Amino acid sequence: MLKGRKGQPFYRDFWFWVKILIFVVFLLFLVYPFYTLVVNSFFSTKAEGVTLYNFQRFCQKKYYYQALGNSLKISLIPTLLSILIGVPMAYLMTRFNIAGKIFWHVLIILSLMCPPFLGAYSWIILFGNAGIVTKFLTGLFGFQMPSIYGQGGICAVFTLKLFPYVYLYVSGAMGSIDRSVEECAENLGSGKLRRLLTVTVPVVTPSIAAGALMVFMTALADYGTPGILAGGDFRTLPTLIYNEYLSETGGNANLASAISMIIVVIALLILFLQKAWVARKNYTMSALRPPQITEYHGVKRFWVTLPVALVSLIAFIPQMVVVFCSFVKTNYSNFVFEEGFTLEHYAELGRGLTSQISNTFVYSTIAILFILILGILMSYVIVRRRGKTGGALDMLMMAPYVIPGSVLGLCYIVAFNNLGTGADGTVIKLTGTAAIIIISMIIRKMPYTVRSGSAYLMQMDPSVEEASINLGVSPMKTFLKVTARLMLPGVLSGAIISWVTCINELSTSIMLYTGKTMTITVAAYTNIVRNSVGTGAALASILTVTSGVLLVIVFRASKGKVSFV
Amino acid sequence: MARIELTHVTKRWGGFYAVDDLSLLIDDNAFVTLLGPSGCGKTTTLRMIAGLETPTTGKIVIDGVTVFDSDAGINIPANKRRVGFLFQNYALWPNMTVYQNIAFGLSNIREAGLSVTAEGELIRNPEAKGEARKLTKEEIDKIVARVSAIVKIQPFMERYPGELSGGQQQRVAIARTLAPSPRVLFMDEPLSNLDAKLRLEMRSELQRLHLSTGSTFVYVTHDQMEAMTLATRICLIDNGVLQQYDEPLTVYNRPNNTFVADFVGNPAINFMNARGTQQADGSFRVKLLDGYEASFIPNEKVDIDSWYAAAEKDIAAFRAKERPAEKTNKDVPFKYPIATVTDTAEEKRELDRQDWVIGVRPEFIRISEDGPIEGEVFSAMPTGMETTVRIRVGNYLLTGVVFGGVTYKIGQKVRIGFAGDGATLFSRVNGRLVCCGEVRMA
């Protein structure tokens, strides 16, 4: 028995040690690597001691600062476009009897969950210089398609890929506005459109902002899409980090660290702006009666369903194209559609890429086991044992949004490249091992599990645990035998989403992989970049189909109640 | 089996005092109810004794063992206190069968000095010498069989809680709590999730259970009827402060203040403002109900000056208590309700020692032809066994209870009077009880 401050009795139970464990994990694999990155950015091989050389160089060279401008453009434009598509979609889906509503909803979620570069890739197949549609149009009309490469294409791909964030957040909010709020406006004589713009939309602005933030952060952090669609010398910050890191020798990544810092600062800035803005507009509402769903029939129903169907299908095209193309014969780097179908690309995988496939599943499975255990403990601590460390835990949970995958990859390289010299003179390092890829997956993808788990726990009455403690069972045993088991459904559905995102993870693995630890995403990406399109398509199909199956399972198991954002 | 002692227990969150300096002695084998409006601190008190909540300061002793002492730095964790706790929502584990629910606590016991009687009662003596051991499967079976027989749930052992009715779940929860032979049994509003008929039945069963187990029962409720019918003593709490700790009938007949008088009793007590002075013979000559003259004749003699002196000293002592944080939930005097037909503007004047409140319970309002007060029937609610009548006197409404199925016409003229010596006189300045006695109309 210990005595705390002011004579307060204080004893260390199981949860005290759990908290310590959580903080140690995050200190080792998030705070410490990030700290070394920050330190690293203030050193350079070209200057003595602590220096601002890297930042100066960034600001002076057009090659660098142009990338910042590009990054902002390809994040902001898709954010605005996503709002323009996502909000009307949410409105239509929550207020009208759209035909096949659940089907479209699942399509939208599926398109959100696939790796972004896959979208880029299939748009190239369709609209690229030698794309199917491009060729068709040129051949038929001599019509010249606008180029899919560069800024325009990247924005289009991001918008179609990321508008689901806005859609999911806003439809959640629109579904919980009490009917009376809108009825009241109607009663006071305002028309449908006016009511939508003056009552409904303002009430859901916090959700629009939350969705928009996710779009912005994901677009800003994504490496794969600009990597594939860059075309010529279009650079963004994440591609720049990768290039800078590769171009420097000996793993000295000072400039790359400085660029990473710049991304993180931008992300933080946007996060705080969003929070500050939303804080002034937070409306709380208790929806006693959910909004009325207008029942249309015949032609009218067709017209409200059409836009929803079109948008969902266009968003889902990448997956369909990729799976389709994985069965199409290729002639070097082009698909030859005239010659019928083949399984040769899959045979190709069997010959040379089995380790990549097994890597993906082995790494993500190990990661998910840790995520499950840590996630279940962390959800519990966040909900039931917040204490004075609750705020710090929330911050740690936000980290994956603020720190892009490629930056975390760089952090790990900088921090774990040299952990000292072993007895036999070899350098001990974590980089290049499978462990580091698994750890990066755990740190980046755990929040999905924690959020789902804590939301589930929030609705569970604490007396269920207290009853067990009261019967003489220790807090730890109570947790293992009662609470954890009851939390499992909530945690599991979150964990499957974590799993899907682990399988599809590219931006960190591309920084950390070696020949031995390559995953499907990395292999698909490099194959696509190297124009080995058939193999790329087959690899990507494996990702798409696995993700799709897993997501449909969660959706089924949780009866659509799980949150995907 | 156990006696519980609370000494100066305080629980606060910042400036909010959930429980403010509570000292309480719960006798062995007592059935004490903690009664009060919602949010008054009664559940917090129970949870602090069970160890589910940590007091800010104070000392708690169960069965001679100090389980909490802020000065000595003692805080025995909840799982080692051996107090049974019955939760309001039963808190059964949905993933376990009834049998597993009951056996769960038993299978986790590991201590020395365990034995099970032929009847299936678990005897625990943790201080005994010898090797710590777990209960065997047969012993657990025996205990489960005994407790499930007590609450009559043997047919449901293989069912899951979701397949049981509310009343059956309640019984399972009781069996689960009884299984490890707790020293005391705590119940947090255990009947509030049951329908009215079942509640009445369970109430009687709880009383039998108290008798048969011989345990100390502490029972939290906001239902004064439950408290009155079950308890050997009622502990009435308001705003974290103990108001009265007495036997049920004492609380009913001699309420310490207007809050207690109002909280206990259904239909509620009738309050009347009165103004007047004490006479030489010890009676109080007052005016009430807008002009009626009356005398309040105390059952025992009161010296009003020394009574006031004692009351003021007590209030001053309470205010002067040392508090580390400003109390944000202020102790405002209880605003006793006076039923009127139309709302009247509150009189804006300083109250003095000539202001009184007289309380008359509905059963002491007598409707008779020679009653001194004239009124008319405002509403009448017969239940068959009794009739609750509200009578309008001027702008005031008085509630009376008449036994038997008497029917009254609304608007009918009646005459009423106050019967017996069960009326109560409170000071209007501080709301405290001055004395009990008889109201005699002039």
Image (cartoon, grey):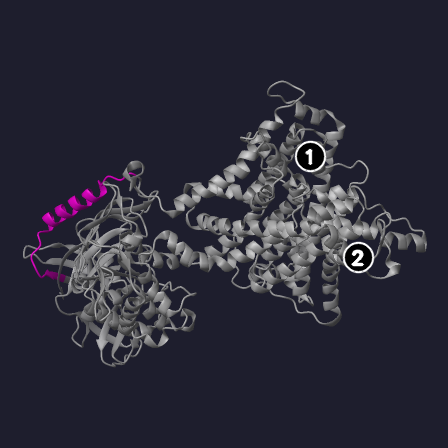
Could you tell me residue A371's position as x and y percent?
53, 50
Looking at this view, is A133 or B410 the one in front? A133
Q: Is residue B308 magenta?
A: yes
Give the amino acid at mark 1.
Ile
Residue that numbered label 2 is attached to: A344
Quadrant occupied by the N terminus of chain A: top left
- Say which of A198 and A370 sits in front: A370
Residue A89 in view: no
Location of residue A55 in the rendering, given as x and y in whole percent from the top left corner: 66, 26
Residue B87 part of the magenta-drawn span? no
- Residue A349, numbered label: none
What amino acid is found at the position of numbered circle 2 in the picture? Glu
Whether discs 2 and 1 lie on one chain: the answer is yes
Q: Which residues are magenta?
A: B295-324
**Residue visible at 49% across and 58% down in the picture:** A488
**Nearer mark to the viewer, of 2 and 1:** 2
In the image, taking residue B330 as reference, residue B256 lies left or right, namely: left
- The 10 Å Cα crowd at callout 2, few under 14, some 14 to 19, many 20 or more, is some
Q: Check the image and name the residue furthest to the left.
A: B281
Which subunit holds the residue at mark 2?
Answer: A
For label 2, the SS is: helix
Q: Vertically, is A436 above or below A164?
A: above
Which residue corresponds to mark 1? A241
